[in-house]
Amino acid sequence: MIDFFHTAVVPAGQPNPTRGKAVFEINSFAALNSVLVPFLSEFPLKSSKALNCIDFLRVLIMINNKEHLTLDGLNIIRDIKAGMNSNRSHADKIAYIESVAESIEITPGWVSGFMAGDGSLGISLTEGSINPKASFGQNNHDEALLEAIKRYFNLTNKLTNNKNPLNNDTFVQQLSINGYQNPAVSQLIDILTEYPLFTNKCLDFEVYKTVVTMMLNKHHMTKSGFASIKSMVLANRLALNEAKFN
């Protein structure tokens, strides 16, 4: 990210003591104008976050034109800011995503990026049972986006709903791709192999991919194969938990 934007990493806020994280901020107008704006023009956001992007770019244009130096311009920017992110109404987000639903185009590279940000990969272990699980999650105002992903993977299962701990009026919807014989699983593995993940989630993917391959080869049906899979999954969980505290 630093090399891509030719800028600096600036810590923002206080890190969560149970889940430390670094925050990347683009603090250069040159980087915003020469890198981020062209990038977002070529690869537009597909969720309702695109509304924030539209407002962000509108303000950036105003600043480039020095409109922020006038009282009227500054007041317009303040009004724009007041309606962004969590201040934007749920209804506005739904209206936007429904207006573009038919034109949402899902691509392999986008799937990888979405998995990195709003997806999960894991292996469910129970007594005598192994179940590879992949999922994508979004607030329910972006249901149309998950439906587009469903069509892309030719899935028929329904979305599941989970209560949003941050807002009692909304809920998080989840699209799951479970099992190891599902054609969507091999499609997802092919995508993430060609467009690799760059965060710690790549470790989850390597385990996920290995377990699916072992199950396709029936290794999980042997005592030694089952034990090998269980050991691999537990070791990965331990490694990721240790990484959170280091």
Image: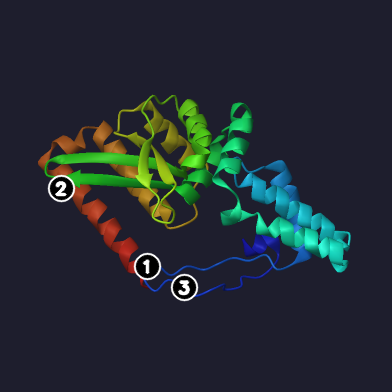
The dot on residue 15 is: 3
Q: In the depicted view, which residue is nearer to us: 106 or 87? A: 87
Q: Quadrant of the N terminus?
A: bottom right
Rendered location of residue 80, percent (x, y): 72, 56
* Quadrant of the image occupied by residue 182: top left
What amino acid is found at the position of numbered circle 3 in the picture?
Pro
Q: In the depicted view, which residue is nearer to us: 20 or 123? A: 20
What amino acid is found at the position of numbered circle 2 in the picture?
Ala
Q: Can residue 209 be seen in this snapshot?
A: no
**Does the residue at mark 3 contact the one at mark 1 (Cβ under 8 Å)?**
no
Nearer the observer: mark 2 or 3; the answer is 3
Q: Which residue is mark 2?
A: 227
User: How much space separates mark 1 and mark 2, taking CA atoms?
Assistant: 26 Å
**What residue is drawn where x is 28% and y is 45%?**
123
**What residue is drawn where x is 12% and y is 41%?**
128
Q: Which residue is mark 1?
A: 244
Nearer the observer: mark 3 or 1; the answer is 3
What amino acid is found at the position of numbered circle 1 in the picture?
Lys
Q: Is 223 left or right of 231, judged from the image as shown?
A: left
Element type at marker 2?
helix
How crowded pointer 3 is (Cα within 10 Å; few <14, some 14-19, many 20+) is rated as few
Nearer the observer: mark 1 or 2; the answer is 1
Q: Is 202 left or right of 224, judged from the image as shown?
A: right
**What residue is drawn where x is 42% and y is 58%?**
200
The dot on residue 31 is: none
**What residue is drawn where x is 47% and y is 57%?**
199
